[in-house]
Image (spheres, coloured by chain):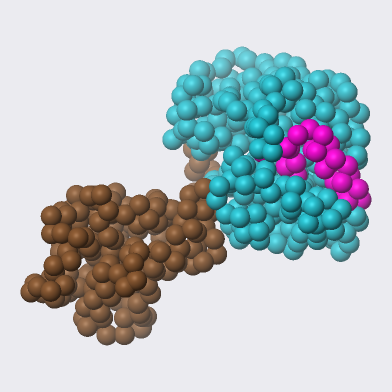
């Protein structure tokens, strides 16, 4: 948190159903962080609403106005919560496609809390086998605790504790840093020319 | 202000008939389009350069030399010349030769090329793209401006006592534009030399290019070539016209929906609202084109893409007739309120007169 400015948190969730357990988990994670960070400004990006925009961006190479707005809210946020359903042993295609339309370095240095949902507990390693490598490639800082919620977790003990621990870890990172909005690099021509 | 057409040279099936033109047909069609451009009163014809299917124009100066012999007035240009994978020595020679044959009606738009495999096919690495563009162009400038060149660089064998022949016509090298859709380094390069900057903004929203062109203008002024509003800017455009707007939309839609670059993505309506593409009546094309000046300032060159996505030659030639009909209006409207100190695009004649070397 920098002096006098609001801390912003982007929540990206790729749930498809309504209601969706992915949305439910994303909301609980965001609320968890809010408890630790008073005045936190939360902006949620529901990828289902942007499904066609994301596909169009892949085809044309540029985002629609509303997708650009969402991308900017994610890239410009101080921290990010990213939650995806588990499809065929990995993050959903929609989730990955959203990450694919981000500029390569746009998440560099950004604190990220990863979450995933699935039908059974047996997919819980999706956090560590799919989401962590993805955000490592994006050079984001992923908090140690990821939160996976299987269907059975919604009627079991344990989930609130994991949500709290993960939210606290993200809040700690948020407290220690300024916004990570990437700056455009500029190299004057003499330097590019390098004496040639 | 210059108006013209630029072509990618793609061989694409006509989605309404399924028929694919032969390479010979496509090459001859490109020539027919250039000749038609002169006939209807346009100023510039620019051909792409590609080294992979489905594109035919791998040898731009061969094509432009042939067109030069069959035209009188048309400025022959490229969109773009691959400054990364071509040997700058061969560019210097080829385009100086073309200058002589075309009596100076030649300029070039430099580009890097974004097809990964083309780089290794020509012994290059796409990751060196910017560095190649900078080194190769720095050498090209010297080859055109110095009779005898000693040179060493990173990307090419050294030169000792090399003279590129023929020398540029009247010792005036062709004017050069630098094209880029996203790299501030290339805008910076254009500004540094006082060259033109061409933004082919036809596939992307204008906001992106406003930043790039504003940056080029500021740096043009920084390097002392004139005020920002005097920088030399070219823009792309893409139009399809029929007298009746609905007819244009109906006829163009299958070509849009199946276009190699953006087909099977956004709808025609979404794309026209987000990019410079205009599909409609001649008046709608005039109105949209005139907005470019509001977005980017007074500029020097407007090129339209008219012949891609499998449009048959007959249709393209009809489109050029429409374009010829609206260009006088565009010239008149672009001239209104244009400050007297905004220059025209440099030509061989204007540079010779001004003593530019």
* Magenta stretch secondary structure, dominant: helix
Identify the residue shown where x is 87% and y is 53%: B243
The quarter of the picture where residue A172 lies is: bottom left
Residue in front for this viewpoint, B155 or B70: B70
Residue B233 x, y percent position in the rendering? 72, 49
- The answer to whether B141 appears left or right of B1 in the picture is left
Quick check: B83 above or below B2? above
Q: Which residues are magenta?
A: B304-328
Left or right: B82 with respect to A52? right
**A170, above or below A63, in the image:** below
Q: Residue B67 appears at what percent x and percent y?
A: 82, 24
- Taking the spot 31% from the left edge, 85% from the top edge, the residue there is A39
Rendering quarter of residue B46: top right
Image coords of residue B285 (percent x, y): 80, 55
Q: Residue at x 22, y 63 (%)?
A: A117
Q: Residue B323 colored magenta?
A: yes
Residue at x-position 47% and y-position 28%? B117
Note whether residue A121 is visible: yes
Instruction: Say which quadrant the C terminus of chain B sits in.
Output: top right
């Amino acid at each position: 948190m920098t002096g006098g400015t609001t801390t912003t948190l982007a929540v990206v969730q790729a749930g498809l159903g309504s209601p969706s357990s992915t949305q439910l988990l994303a909301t609980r994670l965001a609320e968890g962080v809010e408890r630790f960070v008073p005045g936190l400004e939360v902006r949620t990006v529901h990828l289902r609403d942007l499904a066609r925009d994301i596909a169009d961006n892949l085809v044309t190479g540029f985002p629609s106005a509303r997708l650009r707005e969402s991308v900017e809210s994610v890239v410009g946020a101080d921290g990010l919560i990213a939650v995806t359903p588990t499809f065929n042993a990995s993050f959903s295609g929609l989730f990955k496609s959203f990450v694919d339309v981000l500029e390569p370095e746009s998440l560099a240095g950004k604190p990220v809390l990863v979450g995933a949902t699935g039908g059974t507990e047996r997919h819980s390693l999706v956090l560590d086998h799919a989401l962590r490598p993805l955000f490592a490639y994006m050079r984001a800082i992923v908090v140690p605790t990821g939160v996976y919620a299987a269907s059975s977790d919604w009627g079991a003990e344990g989930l609130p504790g994991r949500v709290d621990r993960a939210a606290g870890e993200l809040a700690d990172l948020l407290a220690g840093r300024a916004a990570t909005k990437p700056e455009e690099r500029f190299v004057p021509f003499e330097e590019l020319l390098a004496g040639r | 202000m210059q108006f013209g057409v630029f072509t990618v040279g793609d061989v694409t099936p006509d989605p309404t008939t399924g028929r694919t033109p032969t390479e010979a047909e496509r090459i001859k069609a490109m020539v027919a389009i250039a000749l038609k451009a002169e006939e209807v009163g346009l100023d510039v014809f620019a051909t792409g350069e590609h080294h992979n299917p489905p594109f035919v124009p791998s040898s731009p100066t061969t094509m432009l030399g042939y067109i030069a012999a069959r035209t009188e007035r048309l400025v022959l240009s490229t969109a773009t010349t691959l400054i990364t994978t071509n040997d700058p020595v061969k560019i210097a020679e080829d385009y100086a030769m073309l200058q002589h044959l075309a009596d100076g009606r030649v300029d070039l738009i430099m580009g890097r090329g974004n097809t990964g495999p083309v780089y290794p096919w020509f012994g290059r690495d796409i990751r060196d793209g910017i560095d190649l563009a900078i080194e190769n162009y720095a050498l090209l400038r010297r080859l055109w401006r110095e009779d005898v060149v000693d040179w060493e660089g990173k990307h090419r064998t050294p030169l000792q006592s090399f003279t590129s022949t023929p020398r540029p016509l009247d010792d005036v090298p062709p004017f050069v534009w630098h094209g880029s859709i996203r790299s501030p380094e290339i805008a910076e390069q254009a500004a540094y030399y006082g060259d033109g900057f061409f933004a082919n903004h036809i596939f992307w929203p204008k906001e992106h290019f406003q930043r790039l062109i504003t940056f080029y203008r500021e740096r043009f002024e920084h390097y002392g070539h004139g005020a920002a509003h005097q920088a030399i800017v070219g823009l792309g455009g893409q139009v399809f016209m029929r007298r009746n707007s609905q007819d244009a939309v109906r006829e163009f839609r299958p070509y849009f929906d199946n276009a190699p670059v953006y087909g099977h993505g956004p709808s025609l309506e979404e794309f026209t609202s987000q990019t410079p593409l205009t599909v409609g009546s001649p008046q709608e094309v005039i109105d949209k084109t005139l907005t470019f000046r509001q977005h980017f300032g007074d500029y020097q060159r407007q090129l339209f893409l008219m012949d891609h996505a499998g449009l048959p030659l007959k249709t393209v030639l009809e489109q050029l007739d429409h374009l010829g009909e609206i260009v006088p209006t565009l010239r008149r409207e672009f001239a209104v309120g244009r400050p007297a100190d905004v220059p025209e695009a440099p030509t061989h004649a204007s540079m010779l007169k001004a003593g530019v070397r």
